[in-house]
Image (spheres, rainbow, N blue to C red):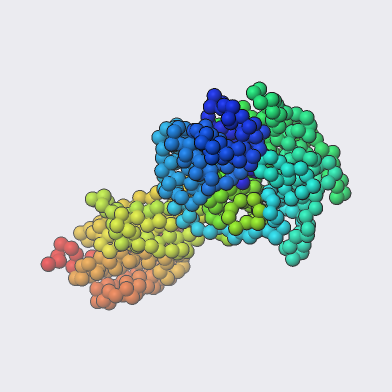
Amino acid sequence: MKKIITLLTIVALSSFSLIAQNSDTKKADKHFNRYEFVAAAEDYAKLVENGKGSPYVYSQLAESYYNVFNTQEAERWYAKALEGNQKPELLFKYSQMLKANGKYEESNAQMAKFASMRPSDDRAIAFNKNPDYLPKILEKGKKFNIQNLDSNTEYSDFGGVLQDSKLYFTSARNTSRRTYGWNEEPFLDIYQSTKNTDGSYQDPTLVENKINTKYHEGLVSFNPDGSIMVFSRESYFEKEFEKDSITDYKISQLHLFTASKSGDEWGNVQGFEINTNTYSVKNPSVSADGKTLYFSSNMPGGFGLYDIYKAEIKADGTLGEPKNLGQKVNTQGQEMFPFISSNNTLYFSSNGHLGLGNLDVFYTKEIDGKMAPIRNVGVPVNSSADDFAFNIDEETEEGFVSSNRDGGKGSDDIYALKKLQPLCDVLVTGTVTDINTGNPIEAAEVALYDDQGNKVVSKMTNAQGVAEFIVECDQETELEVIMDGYESKKVTVSGSQEEEQNVSIMLDPIEAILSAEAVNLQPIYFDYDKSNVTAQAAFELDKLVQIMTKYPEMVISATSHTDSRGSNSYNEKLSDRRAKTTVQYVISKGIDSTRISGMGKGENEPKVNCGANCTEEEHQLNRRSEFIIVSGGPQTQP
């Protein structure tokens, strides 16, 4: 999709000084400087064939192929150019092309070189922090289904947006237009296609009435009621451009416009005041409340080639001061195609964050004025190619993404998508160790419980004492750890937006629950007026079973107590039932009935002597079971 990046952006086109140009390269350089990359590649290739290759020619040839996303040829010529000149930005692009061609190990090797040369570059920092990022992205699993739209053509089609049962998108299919030298395809226009009740789409038609011109038109977005369209257009139409001081070539920018809907027609096209002939503003996305416009721009003061900005949409339709979304979102590469969803999740494409291809789709969310971690959407939305112009209806969980991946119909295709499972997740890594030695505990059972107390999954720790779980963002969970010879433990894991949460769980040897006279469990609580063993009680009683199994001569007397509500006689009967239930649970786990007995104490021995003024918490403390060692404690074992 390299043509789309720069049809709708202007990039730094060469990594070498113009001093390397000469009379031999004049013709090719002219094509290159006019963004006619197909012709430029042909001319540079002829120079190589005629024995006039040089690091400059090789790099220009690589850049030409890079800009039309001919990844195989770009890889080849970047490799050749780097033989004589290890320029950091060339290394980065070479790494991107290797990755686009599925050569992940070689790509990482080049990224490592790039990172060593530019250690302070945020792309290098991200790579050094997480060099094994590719398996982590791939192992996240499939979050979406995607399907190539029937309406795609052999030309570039991208940027699907559904509004009022019409799909709006950008396409180069209009063969009545003159072709663009960048990729020899017609200039881009905005199309619309009505969605049928069966989910199919009618034949696309041009959006007429002053929207499309003989120059490029780009992505669209709409205000909440669909009465205002925001779209991008090449600035030649407004006769705004800059002239290159060396080549005298006219360089256009991309501008943002609004159009108003009247009936079925669009008109009253107005440009925003932020449009200028010195930089581009493009890729509009209007927030669900219609109060904020997100866009991409290479305006001065950014962090990279293109950054994502937001600006207030005022009541009169004008824009407030653009605000850069900051260095957490924006890198020294390119961040483009923002889409702000109805739940304020920001999706965007980037070649600066760690991804599977050149452009990958990422997402984040602003929480309390700060951006959450940037996450890769993963496969199949992302591929080894360019993936961009993502949008989704958070209610129907359906949307679109555009890509130039293999297997498509044209140079860029639109894919319909459907979310299969929650997108935002957290890797919870539980590490289980011995509290005394610090050594990892292998083969411990670690169970994950959701916030309703339901057991989700159980895993065994590996040789490093580690068990890993994927949980949904912002969901509180609990880890329960059980290991023979150790006291079982539960740990609450708070909900988070962080990509990873590391939880350290240190286990005490089972003897830690023993004293000279009792087995000291956490209190065995019962619900009010109930005698059944709860899940919390079972967790504690299993510790008693484990210690009694380890010490086969141990005999236990279990006492059960109630709170002070109800009559004394009723409470004595209730506590007796609880004592017997406790004993029966232990016997059900294989302990001989002669080794444990139970007695109800009623309300006669409260743990908290609060009389008639007990709080609910104090009542619960008084509803308990206790375990006295009658005989056969550790000190009496042979």
Rendered-image quadrant of the C terminus: bottom left
The residue lying furthest to the bottom in this view is: 593
Residue 176 makes an appearance in the image: yes
Residue 445 is left or right of residue 320, and the answer is: left
Residue 170 is left or right of residue 582, and the answer is: right
Q: Is residue 575 above or below residue 515?
A: below
Whole-percent x, y for residue 96 in the image: 51, 43
Q: Is residue 592 above or below residue 149?
A: below
Residue 636 is left or right of residue 379, and the answer is: left
Whole-percent x, y for residue 593 in the image: 27, 77
Quarter holding residue 222:
top right
Q: Pick the residue in front: 423 or 139.
A: 139
Q: Pick the residue in front: 427 or 297.
A: 297
The residue lying furthest to the right in this view is: 263
The residue lying furthest to the front in this view is: 50
Whole-percent x, y for residue 410 in the image: 66, 53
Residue 5 makes an appearance in the image: no
Residue 264 is left or right of residue 175, and the answer is: right
